[in-house]
């Protein structure tokens, strides 16, 4: 019996990997930061500012900063989330200072790669170039933007109240490993929800027990391991950059029904000419959860996929380093439990300044 279950899981994994390979062959990428450390001392980085239109379907997140993204009232804990719309400013930056003599760089801010994956993490850290021109780095990671989730996402008795979700952690990176185009990074995050009340209203209603509600707790630890490889091809005045990547995430949460293993395959492509550039990003992944969800009486699993395209008009207003950018991001999370389905569409126009 166990052998039959194992073979079914193995076949499922093979099918998912084949789907990922087919997706990677058919899709392309995201904007990538220049690798290596500058040869001269001084400041460098970017500032990106603009406005965004969001369309969000999500039952778990209430808002980011002051901007409402969730529906406070739900009629059932079994229904798909409803669409919500929000217009927000976009502002992210990365400030770096290089000590050329020691090949050391300190930095503060966001990574554009994270923004394109809707990761609002802010980092402060240091990088060091080694004799073989590879670069190691360590940084403290935190959420500069206040994110609110619902205290009890499953409460149907009235207007659901929010509580802050705080993230703190560390990121270790190793770029251009042994002078190759292979890079690696490991990120640890501690997830702390100020007032976690998941499932407590259903306990009061007699739907689940206190011990079952404990399996829905969202506090805990997140571990991410990511490998990427950078291909660069120059064809006359055009430059092509292709970056396939693989990411494994472990959410080791206090609630066993919320803990999961997730795998993500991403393919990025950038085409760059004198005044224009465009970037296409496609990804596919899936998550398998540890234990049965006590509300829905089945173990959660989900497919995660998305697509993004961004265009750059360089030397905007004839200013060197200034670019006008337009972006579309489509993200989907398709769960076997409808309540956890999620859709995030983001459209934004911004001005990006590199220095």
Image (tube, rainbow, N blue to C red):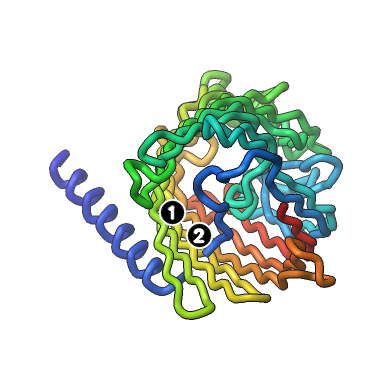
Confirm whether residue 127 shows in the render: no
Counting residues from the start of the chain, the first of labels 2 and 1 encountered is 1
Structural distance between the alpha carbons of marks 2 and 1: 6 Å
* Viewer-side residue, 2 vs 92: 92
Q: Secondary structure at mark 1?
A: strand
| Disc 1: CA contacts within 10 A as few (<14), some (14-19) or many (>=20) | many
Provide residue 38's location: percent of width, then percent of height: 57, 45
Provide residue 350's location: percent of width, then percent of height: 79, 62
Provide residue 145's location: percent of width, then percent of height: 76, 37
Residue 197's tag is none
Q: Residue at x 58, y 51 (%)?
A: 113
| Disc 2: CA contacts within 10 A as few (<14), some (14-19) or many (>=20) | many
Residue 305's tag is 2
Q: Residue at x 71, y 36 (%)?
A: 149
Q: Is residue 262 left or right of residue 317?
A: left
Q: Quadrant of the N terminus?
A: top left
Provide residue 265's location: percent of width, then percent of height: 41, 55
Q: Residue at x 74, y 47 (%)?
A: 92
Q: Residue at x 46, y 43 (%)?
A: 300
Q: Is residue 267 left or right of residue 5?
A: right
Confirm whether residue 313 shows in the render: yes
Taking the view exactly as shown, the residue that stands out farthest to the top is: 211
Q: Quadrant of residue 155?
A: top right
Taking the view exactly as shown, the residue that stands out farthest to the bottom is: 236
* Viewer-side residue, 351 vs 346: 351
Q: Secondary structure at mark 2?
A: strand
Q: Is residue 153 left or right of residue 9?
A: right
- Residue 63 in the image: above or below residue 313: above
Residue indicated by mark 1 = 285
Residues marked 2 and 1 touching at CB (< 8 Å): yes
């Amino acid at each position: 019996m166990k052998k039959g279950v194992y073979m079914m899981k193995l076949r499922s994994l093979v099918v998912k990997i084949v789907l990922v390979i087919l997706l990677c062959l058919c899709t392309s990428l995201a904007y990538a930061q220049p690798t290596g450390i500058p040869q001269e001392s001084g400041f460098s980085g970017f500032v990106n500012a603009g406005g965004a239109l969001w369309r969000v379907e999500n039952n778990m997140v209430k808002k980011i900063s002051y901007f409402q993204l969730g529906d406070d009232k739900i009629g059932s804990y079994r229904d798909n989330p409803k669409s919500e719309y929000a217009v927000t400013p976009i502002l992210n930056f990365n400030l770096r200072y290089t000590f050329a003599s020691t090949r050391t760089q300190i930095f503060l801010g966001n990574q554009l790669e994270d923004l394109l994956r809707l990761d609002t993490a802010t980092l402060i850290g240091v990088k060091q170039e080694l004799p073989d021109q590879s670069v190691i780095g360590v940084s403290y990671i935190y959420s500069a933007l206040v994110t609110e989730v619902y205290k009890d996402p499953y409460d149907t008795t009235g207007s659901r109240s929010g509580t802050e979700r705080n993230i703190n952690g560390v990121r270790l990176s190793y770029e251009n490993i042994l002078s190759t185009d292979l890079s690696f990074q490991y990120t640890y995050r501690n997830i702390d929800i100020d007032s976690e009340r998941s499932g407590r209203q259903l306990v009061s209603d007699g739907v689940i027990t206190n011990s079952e509600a404990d399996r829905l707790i969202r506090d805990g630890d997140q571990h991410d391991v990511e490998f990427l490889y950078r291909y660069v091809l120059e064809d006359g005045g055009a430059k092509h950059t292709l970056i396939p990547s693989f990411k494994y995430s472990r959410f080791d949460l206090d609630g066993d029904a919320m803990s999961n293993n997730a795998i993500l395959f991403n393919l990025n492509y950038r085409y760059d000419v004198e005044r224009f550039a465009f970037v296409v990003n496609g990804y596919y992944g899936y998550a398998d959860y540890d234990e049965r969800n006590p509300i829905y009486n089945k173990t959660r699993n989900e497919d995660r996929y998305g697509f993004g395209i961004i265009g750059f008009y360089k030397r905007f207003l004839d200013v060197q380093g200034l670019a006008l950018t337009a972006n579309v991001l489509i993200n989907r999370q398709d769960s076997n439990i409808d309540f956890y389905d999620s859709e995030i569409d983001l459209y934004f126009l911004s001005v990006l300044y590199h220095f």
